[in-house]
């Protein structure tokens, strides 16, 4: 599955909340999300519209690695 090209930071936050992530703090335009599923994990998301494709790919790779799934499986969970 392809990574969406027009995803905003806030839309990604809403989709990651499905996996148990929640906003724990904000510094400027960057949001820090924390999840306690499968151990504690933090990820920082810029609140930009749209997110740059490399930034989005890196965030998705980190979340997928933490949950022990592939990026394609993560994309299906978030966008289907």
Image (cartoon, rainbow, N blue to C red):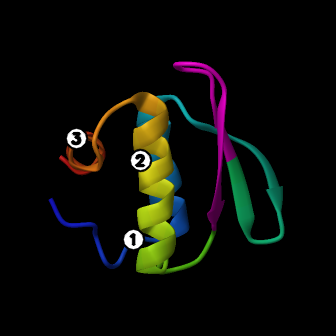
Give me the C-alpha separation between circle 2 and circle 3: 14 Å
Name the dominant secondary structure of the magenta segment: strand
Q: Earlier in the sequence, mark 2 or mark 1?
A: 1
Label 2 secondary element: helix
70 over 32 or under it: above or below: above
Residue 14 appears in the rendering:
no
Give me the C-alpha separation between circle 3 and circle 1: 18 Å
* Mark 1 neighbour density, 10 Å: few (under 14) some (14–19) many (20 or more): some
Pick the front one: 3 or 23: 3
Q: Where is residue 68 in the image (x, y as percent from the top left)?
A: 38, 30
Q: Where is residue 44 in the image (x, y as percent from the top left)?
A: 67, 56
- Residue identifier under label 1: 7
- Residue identifier under label 3: 73
Label 3 secondary element: helix
* Mark 2 neighbour density, 10 Å: few (under 14) some (14–19) many (20 or more): some
Pick the front one: 24 or 68: 68
Farthest-out residue, right: 27
Q: In which quarter of the image is residue 78?
A: top left
Q: Is residue 22 left or right of residue 14?
A: right
Q: Which of marks 2 and 3 is nearer the N terminus?
A: 2
| Numbered range of the magenta stretch | 33-46
Q: Which residue is drawn at 29% across and 49% down?
A: 71
3 over 31 or under it: above or below: below
Pick the front one: 48 or 75: 75
- Residue identifier under label 2: 15
Label 1 secondary element: loop
Residue 75 appears in the rendering:
yes
Q: Earlier in the sequence, mark 3 or mark 1?
A: 1
State which mark lies toward you, 3 or 1.
3
Q: Is residue 54 left or right of residue 40?
A: left
Q: Which residue is drawn at 51% across and 28% down?
A: 20
């Amino acid at each position: 599955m392809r990574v969406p090209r027009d995803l905003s930071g806030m839309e990604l936050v809403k989709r990651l909340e499905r996996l148990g992530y929640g906003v724990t703090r904000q510094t400027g335009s960057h949001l820090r999300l924390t999840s306690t599923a499968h151990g504690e994990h933090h990820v920082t998301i810029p609140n930009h519209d749209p997110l740059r494709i490399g930034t989005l790919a890196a965030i998705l790779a980190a979340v997928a690695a933490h949950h022990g799934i592939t990026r394609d499986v993560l994309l299906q969970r978030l966008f289907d």
